[in-house]
């Protein structure tokens, strides 16, 4: 088995006196689909903020492709190949759909791509999410589900090795959830490892190869979807004693 | 000799600081708690000063009394200002760039209208206690500074009690922290913020009257106070009224000492320098909340 | 892509030629004085918009950068009597450094704190100027107009052509920035700084570049000022109207493009010159303040925005 693309060891993050994450370890294999679940407040968002660079962890190490990334600012991690989508979409509102994708292509992916035909590369990504005919629409006017798709497309445009998808399906209808899942699968087919944070269990069960469960800052379970579903600790965490 | 100067400077600084707290109080509410960057706040204080001046000149009424009497008028103006700001900027999410420029424009318009109507001459008021001094040993306490200090303290304490004891006051603190929870409790965030800004501008009526008691005023004086009030609010920890009072006293004393030992022409820069240093090295202030 | 670049430089050359012709044809020196003031404002507006419109950070202390440029000239002129082009470069360097320093201290915080600190910085600098005797302190300093006005009839014509050239240069810089990869990064920062960072944009570095360019440009605008007014004191150098115009002109003209500040500068500046002559210079301040508030609330995308809306409506009607 090849070395994991992301290795988190003993990660601890505290906010004042409150410990959001307590010595949590997890790893992500190359091209793997990992689910990160847990009740509200379990530390999922804190974990991905530490991975993406929005927060700096207090203790522990984060190895990406074997290199420690702890002190690196968020933009540097994006350039290395860690992409994240935001729970509440954050489009570049003054730009068109196409221009939104050109930013990560011109910055995060700059070292990994050819520079001559950025717009064509952006169009190609738009085609995978079915937005090819909407390239020149202003991003500010999109619907909620379209914004989620744009968010993922923009993450794709960074040509990442790892994508963290932060509750991309929250509040969507069943068919919309399927659309988002399809996009994530396409991404994964291209070799991108995905960490999915989600509350919609159907999506998690279908998409993830392996699941890590957090509760109150600790990792309480790890295994295949089938194993997790039968795990009594997981049931207790979600439903209480 | 040095002790004499030093003590007097410190006392003057404390009196000044108490007054500064009254000036910064309104901004502590709008900027410290509601994140509304009302740069025009000192300009409203100057309007308060001119109001006191006009009434004092025409009717001979005590300036501070005028300030108190005009609080309702300024309260309504503050509510109207928030309404306009909300409709134009907050609702559409444009607060940052446009909102700032809006208040800058308002500040500017106020100053220019005052210049056009009253010119750039210094204006002052007359009252019994201006000009008299209280002597306590080697310390001289001018009444024109003592009276504003006392009134300022009363007003600041009053607002503090209102914010912490009444439902509306606590709703104001709540809307700053969790808008949704406030709505769930049955209070309308927009109305609450409106009242908050009304209170903030109402305080400028009194603060302005205190200002013109302390010394002569002309339209551009407001701009000198921008640095001071923002320094006080930020240093005091954004919305903590107790923090505002402490920061105001600190800045008042530092200014007074610098003016006494280095000369008054450096005094305006003190507030601004403290502001820059705070932003550069400790933006969460002394009692921080950021 | 190629034809567009040529168009700008053709336009620039045409403007330059028109300026030259103007110096030969115009008989009343007042026109040059008025045009100088307007062109100076255009440079300030263009500079402000680089950090304000392109990057989304409001600078309230434009007067400070302008005055640093002016006082650099005063100090260097007194110390060494250097030629004006050298002093312009020195002013650009100093003001640019000031922008960098101010940015480094405060651009890591929210935009609001940056805005307030620029105002503070301006007042602190003004207080320093008031107390610095070498450049005249509060009483100010006199600059002698040089004898040599090259091939122009008078020195003011030379200054006019100089500021026109500087204005064209600043437009070129703004235009280059806005269409470059840097400009794209700045726009991303302006739209959503967090998303920009996670798209790989080095936000702090770009913001510092933006602040430095803005500062340098404003210093360039201020450098010839002492020769224009011949008497410089802190009140006139740290001019409130200069500071307000720097914000109002781009916001009225339109902050999204490099041409908005120029349009705003010409429209508002021209109006101000007319008002000064017909009514009073104080009325100017009121007019620009009201125009600023009016445009921010009613037409936030400025004159350029109004024009674009008009053009879109026409397109829609055709369909």
Image: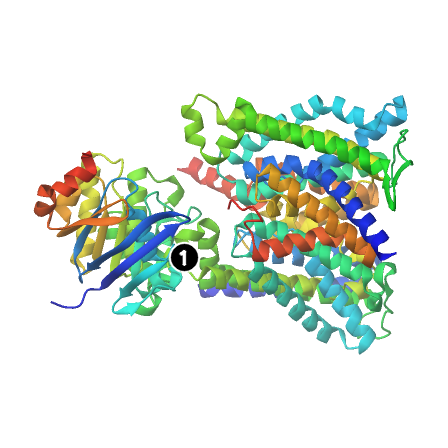
Q: Quadrant of residue A198?
A: top left
Which of C222/B209 is in front? B209
Q: In which quarter of the image is the N terminus of chain C?
A: bottom left
Residue matched to label 1: C197
Callout 1 crowding tier (Cα within 10 Å): few <14, some 14–19, many ≥20? many
Q: Is residue C64 visible?
A: yes
Helix, strand or loop at mark 1:
helix
Would residue C21 appear left or right of A115 to someone viewing this image? right
Which of A127/B287 is in front? B287
- What residue is drawn where x is 66% and y is 23%? B76
> x, y (%) of residue B269?
74, 54
Would residue A196 appear left or right of B132 to someone viewing this image? left
Q: Is residue C149 visible?
A: no
Q: In this view, does A137 lie above or below B29?
A: below
Q: Quadrant of the C terminus of chain C?
A: top left
Badge count: 1
Q: In this view, does B151 lie above or below C143?
A: above
Q: Is residue A103 above or below residue C305?
A: below
Residue that lies at the very extreme toward the front in this rendered image: B137
- What residue is drawn where x is 42% and y is 46%? A93
Chain where mark 1 sits: C
Which of C26/B51 is in front? B51
- What residue is drawn where x is 29% and y is 62%? A62
> x, y (%) of residue A10?
27, 59
Would residue C90 appear left or right of A145 to someone viewing this image? right
Would residue B155 appear left or right of A114 to someone viewing this image? right
- What residue is drawn where x is 57% and y is 28%? B163
Q: Quadrant of residue C126?
A: bottom right
């Amino acid at each position: 088995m090849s070395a994991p693309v992301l290795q988190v060891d003993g990660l601890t993050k505290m906010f004042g006196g409150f410990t959001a994450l307590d010595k949590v370890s997890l790893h992500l294999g190359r091209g793997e689909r990992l689910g990160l679940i847990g009740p509200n407040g379990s530390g999922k968002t804190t974990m991905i903020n530490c991975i993406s660079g929005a927060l700096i962890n207090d203790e522990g190490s984060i190895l990406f492709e074997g290199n420690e990334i702890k002190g690196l600012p968020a933009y540097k991690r994006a350039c290395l190949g860690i992409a994240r989508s935001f729970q509440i979409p954050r489009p570049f509102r003054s730009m068109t759909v196409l221009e939104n994708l050109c930013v990560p292509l011109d910055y995060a992916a700059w070292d990994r791509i050819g520079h001559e035909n950025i717009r064509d590369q952006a169009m190609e990504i738009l085609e995978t999410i079915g937005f090819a005919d909407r390239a020149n629409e202003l991003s500010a006017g999109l619907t909620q589900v379209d914004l989620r798709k744009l968010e993922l497309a923009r993450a794709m445009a960074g040509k990442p090795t790892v994508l963290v998808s932060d509750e991309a399906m929250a509040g969507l209808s069943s068919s919309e959830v399927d659309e988002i899942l399809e996009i994530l699968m396409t991404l994964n087919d291209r070799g991108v490892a995905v960490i999915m944070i989600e509350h919609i269990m159907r999506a998690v069960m279908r998409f993830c190869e392996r699941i890590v469960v957090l509760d109150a800052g600790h990792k309480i379970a790890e295994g295949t979807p089938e194993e997790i579903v039968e795990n009594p600790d997981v049931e207790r965490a979600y439903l209480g004693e | 000799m040095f002790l004499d100067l030093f003590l007097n400077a410190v006392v003057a600084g404390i009196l000044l600081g108490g007054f500064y707290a009254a000036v910064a109080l309104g901004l502590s509410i709008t900027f410290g708690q509601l994140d509304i960057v009302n740069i025009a706040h000192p300009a409203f204080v100057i309007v308060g000063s001119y109001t006191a001046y006009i009434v004092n000149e025409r009717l001979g009424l005590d300036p501070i009394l005028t300030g108190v009497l005009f609080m309702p008028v300024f309260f309504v103006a503050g509510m109207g200002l928030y309404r306009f700001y909300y409709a134009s900027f907050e609702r559409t999410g444009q607060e940052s760039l446009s909102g700032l420029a809006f208040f800058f424009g308002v500040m500017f318009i106020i100053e220019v209208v005052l210049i056009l109507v009253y010119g750039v001459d210094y204006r002052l008021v007359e009252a019994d206690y201006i000009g008299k001094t209280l002597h306590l040993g080697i310390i001289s306490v001018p009444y024109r500074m003592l009276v504003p200090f006392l009134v300022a303290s009363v007003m600041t304490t009053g607002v503090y009690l209102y914010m912490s004891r009444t439902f509306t006051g606590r709703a104001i603190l709540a809307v700053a922290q969790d808008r949704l929870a406030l709505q769930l409790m049955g209070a309308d965030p927009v109305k609450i913020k409106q009242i908050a800004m009304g209170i903030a501008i109402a305080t400028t009526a009194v603060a302005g009257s205190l200002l013109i008691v302390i010394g002569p005023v002309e339209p551009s004086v407001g701009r000198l106070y921008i640095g001071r009030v923002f320094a006080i609010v930020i240093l005091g920890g954004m919305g903590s009224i107790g923090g505002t009072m402490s920061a105001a006293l600190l800045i008042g004393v530092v200014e007074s000492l610098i003016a006494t030992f280095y000369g008054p022409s450096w005094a305006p820069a003190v507030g601004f320098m403290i502001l820059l240093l705070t932003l550069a090295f400790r933006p969460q202030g002394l009692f921080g909340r950021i | 892509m190629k034809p567009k670049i040529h168009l700008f430089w053709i336009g620039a050359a045409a403007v330059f030629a028109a300026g030259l012709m103007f110096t030969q044809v115009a008989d009343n020196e007042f026109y040059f004085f008025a045009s100088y003031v307007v062109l100076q404002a255009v440079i300030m507006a263009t500079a402000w918009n680089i950090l304000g419109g392109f990057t989304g950070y409001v600078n309230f202390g434009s007067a400070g950068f302008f005055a640093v440029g002016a006082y650099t000239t005063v100090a260097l002129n007194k110390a060494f009597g250097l030629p004006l082009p050298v002093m312009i470069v020195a002013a650009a360097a100093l003001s640019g450094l000031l922008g960098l320093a101010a940015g480094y201290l405060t651009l890591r915080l929210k935009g609001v704190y940056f805005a307030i600190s620029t105002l503070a910085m301006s007042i602190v600098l003004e207080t320093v100027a008031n107390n610095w005797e070498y450049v005249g302190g509060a009483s100010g300093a006199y600059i002698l107009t040089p004898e040599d006005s090259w091939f122009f009839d008078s020195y003011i014509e030379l200054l006019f052509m100089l500021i026109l050239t500087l204005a064209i240069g600043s437009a070129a810089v703004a235009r280059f920035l806005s269409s470059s990869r840097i400009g794209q990064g700045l726009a991303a920062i302006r739209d959503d700084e967090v998303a920009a960072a996670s798209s790989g944009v080095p936000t702090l570095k770009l913001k510092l570049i933006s602040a430095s360019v803005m500062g340098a440009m404003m210093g360039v605008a201020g450098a010839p000022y002492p020769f224009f007014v011949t008497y410089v004191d802190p009140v006139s150098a740290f001019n409130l109207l200069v500071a307000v115009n720097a914000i109002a002109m781009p916001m009225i003209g339109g902050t999204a493009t490099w041409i908005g500040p120029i349009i705003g500068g010409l429209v508002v500046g021209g109006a101000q010159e007319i008002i000064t002559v017909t009514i009073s210079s104080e009325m100017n301040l009121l007019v620009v303040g009201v125009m600023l508030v009016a445009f921010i609330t009613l037409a936030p995308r400025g004159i350029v925005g109004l024009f674009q809306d008009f053009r879109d409506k026409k397109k829609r009607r055709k369909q």
